[in-house]
Amino acid sequence: MKRFAFTMLELVFVIIVIGILAVLAMPNFNRHPLQEAAEQVAGHIRYTQHLAMVDDKFDANDAAYYMKRWQIRFRKNSNTLYYAVYSDKNQDRNVNCNVTFCDEPAIDPLTKKPLYYLASRENKNMILSKQFGITSINVSCDVADSSLYTNSLGVIAFDNLGRPYNGIGNNTVGPYNFLLSTPCIMTLTHPDGNAIITIHPETGYVSVGY
């Protein structure tokens, strides 16, 4: 006589297997804001390098063309920590972006928002203290021309070969003055700990550690 039903033992076994698979497939809904912030910043550093390599700013008619290089700049205003990815097209040391005109920041390919922090065009993810609870940012290769920038914590720029620079300079210096020669260590501090982002010289390779 043929048997067409499962035994109780077989049913229990199948239920256990399905339960295990369900647990393994279940997404982790616990947020890790420090990790999220570090991975986002590292991704934006890589994106800045990509933009620099596909958008060569060399101009034989502009001796200070290097001031237009794509850069990622970190700033602090009171207890607010934020950053932007942009090209200083008019070389005025500001990010030209307002309600009606915004042509210097990079555009996030996913959200289509400027990678900028201005309130009128706020991309909340760019405000690390507000979105991720980051309490401080320390950049070992602090921008060499920091006195020229208000509230600057550091800047990383890239040339058309993808090489990193720890500054932009001004029209009185040469295009290779701030070429990174040692690893740049960026530390993001959070109540849960620290994240270390390292930008390596020459290649611009970015690594993240905790």
Image (cartoon, rainbow, N blue to C red):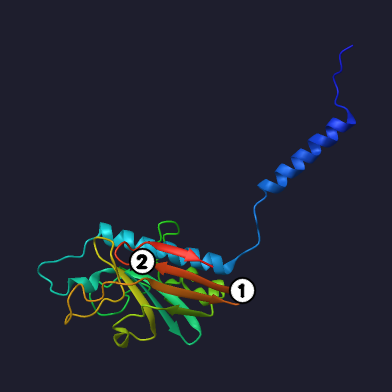
**Residue found at x 31% / y 75%:** 166
Q: Nearer the viewer, residue 7 or 54?
A: 7
Query: Which label belongs to residue 192?
Result: 1
Q: Nearer the viewer, residue 70 or 143?
A: 143
SS label for mark 2:
loop
SS label for mark 1:
loop
**Residue found at x 27% / y 73%:** 88
Image coordinates of residue 139 in percent, x first then y, are 41, 78
Residue position marked by numbered label 2 in the rendering: 200
Q: Sequence-wise, which precedes: disc 1 or disc 2? A: 1
- Is 12 drawn above or below residue 188 in the view shown? above
Horizontally, residue 91 falls left or right of residue 38, namely left
| Label pair 1/2, CB-CB below 8 angstroms | no
Q: Is residue 197 visible?
A: yes
Given the image, on which type of amino acid does mark 1 rest? Answer: Asp
Report which quarter residue 85 is drawn in.
bottom left
Which image quarter holds the N terminus?
top right
Report which quarter residue 97 is drawn in.
bottom left
